[in-house]
Amino acid sequence: MLGIAISAVLVMGLVLPTHAQTEKSDLYIGLLLDFGAEATDDDGELSLLQEEIHKVLGVNTSVHFLPEHMRFSAHHEDYLSLANDPAVDLIIAAGPASAAMLAAQGALPKPTIAVGILDVELQQMPLVEPGVSGVRNFTYVLSTHSIQKDLAAFHRIHPFAHLAVIISETLKGKLDFEDFFERLAAPYGTQVELVFWGKEAPLPELSGAVDAVYLAVVFERSPEEVALLSEALAERKLPSFAMSRSYVDAGIMACIGDESGRDQIFRKLALIVEGVALGEELAAMPVRHNLDEQWVLNAATIRRIGFDLSFEALFSARFLKADEPISDRRLSLQEIIAEGLQSNLDLRIEKRSVDLASQDMRRAKSSLLPTVETSTTLLQIDPDIAERAFGQQPERTGAGTGTVQQVLFSEQAFANVKIQQYLAEAVRHRTDLVALDVVLNLATAYFNILLVKTGARIQDENLEVSRRNLKIARTRNAVGYAGVADVFRWESEVARATQASIEAFNNLYLAKVQLNRLLNRTDIGEEFEVEDAQLSDELFGRFDPARIGPLIDRAGDVEILTDFLVAEALQNMPSLKQLAANMKAAERQQQMNRRLYYLPTVALRGQADYTFWRAGKGMPPASSDPVNSTWNLALHFTYPLFQGNQRKIAIDQTAIQQQQLRLQEESLRQQLSQAVQVRMTNLVSRRTNIHFAGIAAASAQKNFELVQDAYQKGQLAITQLVDAQRAALSARQAEAGAVYEYLVSYLQLENSIGGYTMFMTSEEQEAFVGRLTAFFAKRKNAP
C-alpha cells in the first residue's frame, strides 16, 4: 500500500526526491511518511523512483530505500533520527503534516525534500522569488494541480450545496482544514462538512444533507477500501471527486489529473538528485512543477448514478471503465435476427399482406358456394280491389319466401379462385424477399455497430496519441528544440482528434438507434451491448466453411463458383418466384378471357313461397281451401352475346400484361446475375483486404513509432510526424473494418442467391455442398 499512498501523494502535488554526494556510489534515502507502517506492503513506486534516478545518475550510483530508514509519523524527533543517521544521505518527507512540520523548522541539517503540499498558506510553506524555498537544505514540490482547482472544476459540472470533504483521521488537528476548505468554498456559497475517516471505520459517516463528496487526503487507504466507499456513494447517487487518478480507477466519479503525472514527478525528483550531486543548493531550486491537467472520469460510476455530464467534461475527458457493459441487454447476431424476424415492422406489414391475400382467396372460393335468402312481405291493397278479386287477393296478407341458388358452372368464378391462389403465392414470395432483406439489414446494422464501436475506440486512442505528441512538442519548445509553431500545430491536431472522437461516439449512438428501429423497439434510444464477431466464430464457420473459402482465392475457381451461384439464384430467388406466380395468374386470366367467348354460366335456382296470414275484405269463402304454399326450381343458362367489345379488349390487355411480365422476368434474371457477380467480386476483394490491411496497419504503426521517436529527438519535422500518425490511424481503421466488411459482403452474396446457409439444416447444407461439388466436377471435366 506504500506505493499506492505515494502515488496518491504525487498526483496531489506530493512528490519524492533524493540527494546524493558525488563521491559516493551508493545513495541511501530516508523516508518520513504521514501514514503508518501498515502501508509498507508494496514498494513498487519506490522501485520506479529508484529506476528513474538510475537513468539520470547512471549505473555507477545505486539508490537504496531501507526499512530502517523509514519513519511513520510527522514528528520532529523522527525527522532528527533520520537527519542524525550518518548512513542517510537524503530525506524525503511525504505527506501534508510532515511537510508543514519541516516548513516550520527553518534551515535543516540534511538535504530534505517535502511532497504533499496542499496549499502554501495552509502549511506555511516558505516561498520566495523566483519561486524557491530560500531555506538551506530544504525544497519541496508545489504542483500546479491544487484542491482549489479541483473544487472549481467539480462545482462547474455539479453545483453542489453541501460538500463532504473526506480526510484521513491521522491528519485531524495537525492542519487547520476547517478554515482552509471554508475559504475555498466561500465563492460558491457552499456548506462544507469535514469528515475524518478513521482507521477502524470501514466507511466514513456522511450526513443526509450531503449532495457531493470530495475525497481529499486519504492516501493510506487501499484500492479495495476506496472501492467500497465508491460503492456506498453510488448507492446514494452521490457525485464524487478525488485528488488522485488512482481513486477514479477504484470507482470515484472524477478527478483532474493525468496518468503521466507520476512519471513527470519522478523525473523531476531524479533531476533534483542530479542537481544536488553536482553541488547545487536545495534552497535555490524551483519548487513549482507544471502538470498537464485533464478530466478523468469513471464511465461505469457515471452511468450507475445517472450523472448528466457537462459538454466541457464530456468532450475533453479521458474515460475509465468505458468498455464495461452499459446495459444488461446484450445481443448476438443470432438473437438480433431472431428478434427482427418476429418484430420488424416492414416484415410484419408484408405478413399482413399475406393475410389479406388469404382473405381474397376465401372470397373467391365463396362465390362457388350456394346462396340462401329468406324474405317476409306484409301487403295492404285497396279494399275495393280486394272485394272484386273473389277471394284471390285479400285486403291484407302476410307471406314468406325462401330462395336457394347454386352456381354449377362459371368460368369467371373458377378462374378467379385460381388467380387469387397465384396472387397469394406471389405475395408469400414477396414476403420471403422482404425477410431476406430484413435479415441483411439487421446483420448490416449489427456489423456497423461493431465497426463504428471499433472506430470510436481507435479515434479515442488517436486522441491520446495526439495529446502525448502535444506534450512532446511543448517539451521540445521549452528546451529550444522546436518553435512554438509545433505546439500550435499539435493543439490543432488535438482539437481535430477530439472532434473525430466525438463524431465517432455520436455515430455509435446513431448505429444503435438504427438497429433498435429495425427491431421495432419502443424506445429507439434504448442502450444495449452487442457481442463481437470473428471469422473463427461457429456461426460464420457454418456459412464460410473450408469448402467454400479457398475457392475465392483462385481466379478460375471464382468464375466457376460465380456461375454456380448464379444458377442457385435463378432457382431460389423469391423475386423470380413472385414473378412466376404473377405470370401464372395472367395466363389463367387470359385463358378465362378466351373461354368466355363460348362458355355459359350455369346456375340452379329454387324458390318456395308460403302465405301465413290473410285479413280484411276479399277473404276467400270459409268453405274454400286456398293454396298457402308454392315452390319452383329453375336451371339458368347465361350467355352474353355482345358486351360492347369488352371481351376482345380484355384479351388484348392481358396479352400486353403477359409480354410485360416476360420482359420483367428477363430483366430480373439479368439483374440477379449481375448482383451475384458484383457481390462475388466484392467478397474476393474484402477477403484479400483482411490480409493486406493487417500488414498495412502493422507497418504504419511501426513507421509512426519510429517517426515519433525521431521527432522527439529533434531529427524530423512536425509534418512528417503528423503524416505518419494520420497514416497509422487510417490503416488501423481499415484493418478494423476489414473483417466486418468481409462478413457483410458474404451475407450480401447469400442475399443475392435467395437464402442464408446459417439458417439451413445440416441436411440442406450437405445438399448445397453436394450441388456445388457436382457443378465443379462437371465444369472441370468438360472438354
Image (spheres, rainbow, N blue to C red):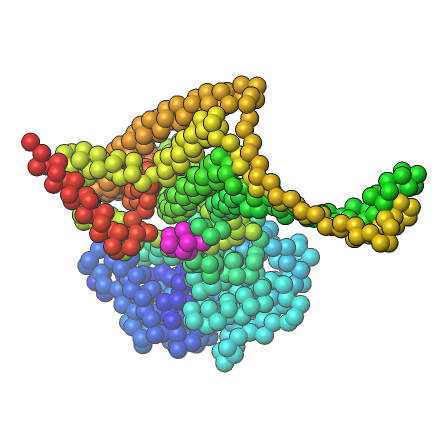
- The residue most toward the top is 645
Count the labels in the image.
Answer: 0
Please tell me which residue is depicted at 42% across the width and 23% down the height of the picture.
655
Queried whether the magenta region covers residue 609, the answer comes back as no
> With 405 as the anchor, is 270 left or right in this view?
left
Q: Nearer the viewer, residue 377 or 714?
A: 377
Answer with left or right where residue 336 lies relative to residue 211. left
- Magenta part, dominant SS: helix
Q: Nearer the viewer, residue 410 or 159?
A: 410
Q: Position of residue 534 (x, y in %)?
A: 29, 51
Image coords of residue 325 (percent x, y) = 44, 58
Q: Position of residue 554 (x, y in %)?
A: 15, 37
Instruction: Tell me the magenta residue range.
Output: 331-339
Instruction: State whether residue 176 appears in this view.
Output: no
Q: Nearer the viewer, residue 487 or 567?
A: 567
Q: Quadrant of the N terminus?
A: bottom left
Q: Position of residue 288 (x, y in %)?
A: 45, 52
Identify the residue shown where x is 34% and y is 64%.
45
Q: Quadrant of residue 394?
A: top right
Q: Quadrant of the C terminus?
A: top left
Residue at 51% across / 69% down in the picture? 231
Q: Compared to 518, does 334 lie above or below?
A: below
Measuring 50% from the left and 77% from the top, which residue is drawn there? 202
In the image, residue 127 above or below residue 742: below
Residue 765 in view of the camera = yes
